[in-house]
Image: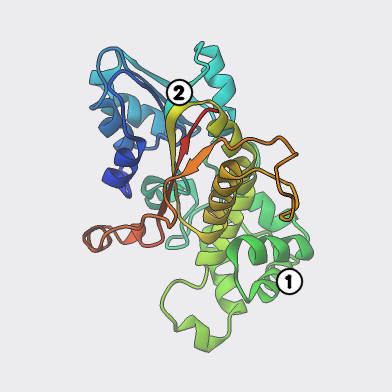
Amino acid sequence: MDFMHKSVLLEEAVDGLKVKPDGVYVDGTLGGAGHAERVCGKLSAKGRFIGIDQDQDAIIAATRRLEKYMGNTTIVRSNYCYMVQELKKLEIKKVDGILLDLGVSSYQLDHAERGFTYQEDVPLDMRMDQRAARTARDLVNEYSEKELFRVIRDYGEDKFARNIARRIVDYRENKSIETTGELAGIIKEAIPMKYRKMPGHPAKRTFQALRIELNGELEVLENSLESMIEILKDQGRICVITFHSLEDRIVKNIFKKSENPCTCPRDFPVCVCGKKPLGRVITRKPILPSQEELNANRRSKSAKLRVFERMEQ
């Protein structure tokens, strides 16, 4: 199965980067290379593109798709949290633009063997990097009821988190939970009948929560976004596409803090903390998909794009 992924907010994200033909650009979530191909097409022979992804399937597909740009393109298998270190290996200290398209790809959802889906009965996996030892199966069979409740409540924002956690623990007393179908069935039983009939799959939030926990998605974002802003050149931009409120909140807060890092009390007449702004927020409100894109790609529904521009003092 080819790595098919319809790039969300494609035009808006690439426009947000304000690509300079001779610039250096990084895509930290390369995926199927939809955004990357558009960026590479805007670069001159002097420009440079670095694509990073932890998924081997994405690396293979992107290498194929970007074949004609390989003269000035480097593809690295890594997590974007190691972006600064990976660029250092390539002797790159500063870049003109960074793109992050967060969350799970259409390929990962549609390729049942990857174990992200609740639509089919396949082994529980959910690893974005298949080199990782731990899978979602380990989480549901080893986490305590309290830990499961925390994950489902915090990352799935599911009001039935306590019921679901209890049902998982009760079920595994008799046998371990091995497949996505088993888990989806347990979740369904934990949700009151009237809510099961509502639109959307009852397992969606729990599966999202387990995926985020397993892959450390929020910690990776929170711990690396500021360092990415710092490696931007003057007027360089970072564009981040998020797919749920937890990610968006992190991006919004870090962009806001980077624009106004001052920690002095509001009644101080002048700043004495010495913290200087790193730049400015371009998107006061996030950019959302157009109605045309929503009609063409239902998975774009929750997407939000935020843009920050570096301004050196």
Mark nearer the N terminus (1 vs 2) = 2
Q: Position of residue 50 (x, y in %)?
A: 41, 23
For the residues marked 1 and 2, what is the alpha-carbon distance in whole angstroms? Answer: 51 Å
Q: Amino acid at mark 1?
A: Asp
Residue 214 located left or right of residue 8: right
Observer-nearest of 276 and 166: 276
Q: Amino acid at mark 2?
A: Val
Dot 2 falls on a residue whose secondary structure is strand
Q: Which residue is mark 1?
A: 170
Q: Which residue is mark 2?
A: 95
Q: Is residue 285 above or below residue 310?
A: below
Q: Position of residue 308 (x, y in %)?
A: 46, 41
Dot 1 falls on a residue whose secondary structure is helix
Name the residue at 56% across, 15% down.
88
Q: Quadrant of the N terminus?
A: top left
Observer-nearest of 291 and 103: 291
Question: How is the structure coloured here?
Answer: rainbow
Name the residue at 74% across, 50% down.
268
Which mark is on residue 66?
none
Q: Tell me the crowding category of disc 2: few under 14, some 14 to 19, or many 20 or more residues within 10 angstroms, Cα based.
A: many
Q: Are marks 1 and 2 in contact (CB under 8 Å)?
A: no
Q: Is residue 63 above or below residue 142?
A: above
Name the residue at 49% across, 53% down.
116
